[in-house]
């Protein structure tokens, strides 16, 4: 008789999802009233949380429980808002877009479609619960931890929708038990300083927050997030990644940084949606906000993540863009809108209303320089925490360079290693140019000075290494100095050396940039103290010097409109008091591409008043434009 009445009530229930939520707290307390042992209480809570609609469960007076009525009211206040089918389906589709497995994508999208249509009959509910079970089966067999976390999170949202809309069938309790066991097994990953499963575990703990076995899971998530964000994010917002505890492989580079920040953003969004409260403390919130600004600097055209294999799915960076657009900081909102555009906007936002295009954090040893926030902007990032810095160059939606910028210095045949960390010697940036120079001490009283120069308007990047004598150091003036540097090309690019000259063309489906070793003669037939050639690791530049100083520049022209135009370069003579200087004292160059010409000067000894192409110089570094009448416009001058 009771079962029949239950079925009739189920048939008359309206299809609206705005009805009362399942009182999970009352169901969990009834387990104690029926005499379950305390050790079995958590399992009983999980089993009772998703009883099928119409199942009659005896609930005794609250006064007979070990808890109080106030405790029960407190539990009920933690029950999240109703879970809508469209919201759940949309979230599951986003999880499917993030998966790398075709089977997982298909299964999650099928689950999202079933939830979108909804069902009140027993057969429809059984189909949805079967799909949830398949998600958990696939999660148990997944070889990649990330695929397991995505499937478990999708099943959590689907099961929460069944429970909150009073659709839970006979197998729902077993599904929740499996989810709790999986979450408990993943707590070891959280405690091992890896927040990969944080989104799944937090969703489970918040959506079923009145189940004791789920509620206690949130503490590990909070602690793990606060520890990881505090450890990886500097006060300036730079994110420094090391080895992944889940996979044991290196996870460095812009793609890994953006995905890590996006992971934190997803967890924060789940916490705000399910409980309107942050998953961490105020200090962590401040660092997360700073990390979001850094991650925006690393995004490519259309707000996409750029990797060596190409653009990653938009779903991986969408949480970051959504959070930035919802920020109360106007520059952050405007920047997210600007970088998310795929084409030239009809009206551009003034640069002063956007985030600064450069991010320089010497404490974290990270510098990011952009030419702007437009769809085709150029971006250069350098991480110099280790002896071999990591370099990335991206243009629009293409990654041009990605990897370690290797170097080697030999003096009289003996290799010179770095005797200390890299330190910032100079950083200057304005609308005309950006200049970064870092220094590392070498043996024998020498030092290596690494330069990165960007001219935004001309889309020129200069990568150069200078070997000089340390201040107060002594070195043989006539030692045989040898240098070798390799700039890392993205794996998707191919190279072609010119037939008669020394420039190298880099391309994939189109020409991307031209690399010119301007310290070597332009023509291949001319004698040279060095070589420049493409290798599987990148573009390798070798140079020799008979003195104790050397300058090895690589000029990159990334302007597509000039690629294929006539180009040339020359080494110029530098004079000091009407005396020509040797190449190990000061160097000068003239570079021409199309109708544009540039002048480059670098002093390798103590700067003093000198002459180059009719210009009087007293600086250490100069980069300027040569006009049609031969006058030099000084774009960048470093004393």
Image: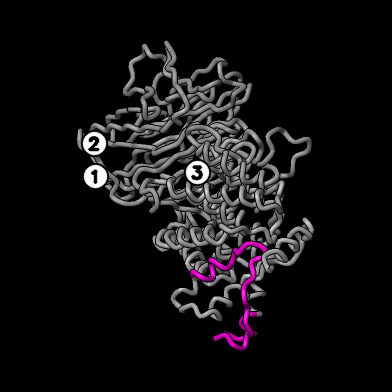
Q: Which residue is at the far front?
A: 1
Q: Secondary structure at mark 3?
A: helix
Horizontal side, residue 638 vs residue 301: left or right = left
Mark earlier in primary sequence (2, 3): 3
Q: Position of residue 405 (x, y in %)?
A: 39, 37
- Which element carries disc 1, helix, strand or loop? helix
* Towards the viewer: 39 or 203: 39
Instruction: Find numbered disc 2 in the image and state the secondary structure of the residue it sits on.
Output: strand
Quadrant of residue 552 in the image? Answer: top left
Q: Nearer the viewer, mark 2 or mark 3?
A: 3
Residue 271 relative to residue 201: left or right? right
- Badge 3: residue crowd in 10 Å (few <14, some 14–19, many ≥20): many
The reply to whether the C-beta atoms of the residues labelled 1 and 2 are less than 8 Å apart is yes
Q: Which residue corresponds to the image point at 57% horizontal and 68% vertical from the top-left?
A: 48
From the image, tell me which residue sits under label 2: 411
Residue 66 inside the magenta-drawn segment? yes
Q: Quadrant of residue 404?
A: top left
The percent position of residue 432, horizontal first and vertical second, equals 61, 39
Residue linked to disc 3: 254
Which stretch is magenta? Answer: 43-72
Q: CA distance from mark 1 to mark 2?
A: 9 Å
Residue carrying label 1: 444
Marks 1 and 3, the one that precedes in the sequence:
3
Q: Residue at x 25, y 41 (%)?
A: 416
Name the N-terminal-most of marks 1 and 2. 2
Which disc, if any, is residue 374?
none
The residue nearer to you, when weighing 80 against 412, is 80
> How far is disc 2 from disc 3 in space, using C-alphas?
35 Å
367 up-or-down from 194: above or below:
above
Q: Please check the rendered image and state whether residue 270 is part of the magenta-colored stretch, yes or no.
A: no
Q: Residue 445 placed where, x, y %?
A: 27, 46
């Amino acid at each position: 008789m009771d079962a029949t009445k239950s079925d009739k009530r189920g048939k008359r229930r309206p299809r609206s999802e705005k009805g009362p939520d399942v009182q999970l707290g009352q169901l969990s307390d009834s387990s104690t009233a029926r005499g379950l042992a305390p050790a079995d209480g958590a399992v009983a809570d999980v089993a009772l949380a998703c009883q099928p609609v119409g199942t009659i469960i005896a609930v005794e007076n609250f006064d007979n429980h070990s808890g109080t009525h106030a405790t029960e009211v407190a539990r009920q206040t933690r029950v999240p808002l109703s879970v809508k089918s469209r919201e759940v389906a949309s979230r599951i589709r986003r999880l499917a877009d993030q998966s790398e497995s075709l089977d997982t994508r298909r299964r999650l999208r099928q689950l999202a479609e079933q939830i979108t249509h909804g069902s009140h009959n027993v057969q429809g509910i059984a189909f949805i619960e079967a799909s949830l079970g398949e998600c958990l089966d696939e999660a148990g067999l997944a070889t990649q931890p990330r695929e397991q976390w995505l499937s478990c999170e999708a099943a959590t949202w689907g099961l929460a929708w069944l429970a909150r809309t009073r659709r839970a069938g006979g197998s729902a309790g077993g599904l929740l038990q499996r989810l709790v066991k999986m979450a408990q097994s993943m707590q070891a990953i959280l405690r091992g300083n890896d927040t990969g499963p944080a989104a799944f575990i937090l969703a489970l703990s918040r959506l079923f927050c009145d189940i004791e076995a789920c509620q206690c899971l949130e503490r590990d998530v909070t602690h793990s997030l606060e520890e990881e964000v505090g450890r990886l994010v500097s006060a300036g917002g730079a994110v420094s990644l090391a080895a992944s505890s889940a996979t044991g492989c290196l996870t460095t580079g812009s793609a890994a940084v953006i995905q890590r920040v996006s992971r934190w953003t997803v967890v924060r969004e789940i916490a705000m949606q399910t409980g309107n409260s942050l998953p961490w403390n105020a200090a962590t919130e401040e660092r997360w906000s700073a990390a979001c600004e850094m991650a925006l600097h690393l995004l490519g055209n259309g707000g996409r993540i750029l990797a060596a294999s190409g653009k990653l799915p938009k779903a991986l960076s969408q949480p970051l863009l959504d959070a930035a657009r919802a920020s109360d900081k106007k520059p952050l909102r405007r920047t997210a809108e600007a970088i998310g555009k795929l084409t030239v906007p009809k009206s551009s936002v003034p640069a002063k209303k956007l985030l600064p295009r450069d991010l320089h954090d010497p404490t974290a040893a990270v510098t990011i320089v952009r030419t702007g926030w437009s769809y085709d902007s150029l971006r250069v990032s350098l991480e110099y925490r280790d002896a071999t810095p990591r370099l990335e160059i991206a243009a629009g939606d293409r990654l041009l360079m990605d990897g370690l910028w290797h170097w080697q210095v030999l003096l009289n045949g003996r290799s010179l290693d770095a005797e200390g960390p890299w330190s910032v010697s100079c950083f200057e940036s304005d609308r005309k140019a950006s200049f970064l120079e870092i220094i590392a001490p070498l043996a024998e009283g020498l030092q290596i000075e690494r330069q990165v120069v960007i001219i935004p308007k001309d889309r020129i990047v200069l990568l150069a290494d200078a070997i000089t004598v340390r201040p107060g150091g002594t070195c043989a003036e006539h030692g045989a100095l040898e240098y070798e540097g390799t700039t890392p090309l993205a794996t998707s690019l191919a190279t072609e050396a010119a037939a008669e000259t020394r420039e190298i063309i880099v391309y994939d489906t189109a020409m991307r940039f031209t690399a010119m070793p301007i310290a070597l003669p332009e023509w291949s037939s001319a004698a040279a103290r060095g070589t420049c050639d493409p290798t599987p690791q990148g573009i390798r530049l070798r140079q020799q010097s008979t003195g104790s100083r050397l300058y090895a520049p690589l000029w990159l022209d990334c302007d597509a409109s000039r690629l294929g135009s006539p180009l040339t370069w020359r080494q110029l003579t530098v004079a000091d008091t009407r005396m020509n200087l040797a190449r190990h004292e000061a160097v000068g160059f003239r570079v021409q591409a199309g109708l544009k010409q540039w002048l480059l000067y670098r002093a390798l000894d103590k700067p003093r008043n000198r002459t180059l192409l009719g210009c009087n110089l007293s600086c250490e570094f100069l980069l300027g434009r040569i006009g049609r009448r031969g006058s030099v416009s000084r774009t960048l001058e470093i004393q």
